[in-house]
Image (cartoon, rainbow, N blue to C red):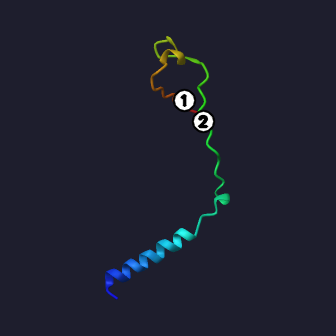
Amino acid sequence: MSRPAWLAGAAGALFATLALAAPDWSSLNIQPYDAPKPAPAFALPGIDGKETRLSDLSGKVVLVFFWATW
């Protein structure tokens, strides 16, 4: 048997073995996907003291980043 034929046979046997060994899905603790919910209405003060409401930013991408120093 030539080397390419042997290699192809070994690769085929490996892939067939992997295909038969299905993972144990129940042990993975997979959670069902919940569709995103709309953000609640809120307003935050800006650096300039002006209040910005989430509804003012409708149709725009909004990233809300909270941090603390404690």
Distance Cα–Cα, label 1 vs label 2: 23 Å
Q: Quadrant of the N terminus?
A: bottom left
| 6 left or right of 68 in image | left
Q: Position of residue 25 (x, y in %)?
A: 64, 59
Local packing at callout 1 (Cα closer than 10 Å; few below 14, some 14-19, many 20+) is few
Asked if residue 60 is positioned above or below residue 20 in the image, the reply reads above
In the rendered structure, which disc, 1 or 2, sits on the residue that comes first in sequence?
2
Which quarter of the picture shows residue 5? bottom left
Local packing at callout 2 (Cα closer than 10 Å; few below 14, some 14-19, many 20+) is few
Residue placed at 64% from the left, 57% from the top? 28
Residue picked out by circle 2: 35
Q: Position of residue 35 (x, y in %)?
A: 60, 36
| 34 left or right of 48 in image | right
Disc 1, SS? loop
Residue type at the position of mark 1: Phe
Q: In the image, which disc is placed on residue 66?
A: 1
Residue placed at 46% from the left, 21% from the top? 59
Q: Position of residue 68 (x, y in %)?
A: 56, 31
Residue type at the position of mark 2: Ala
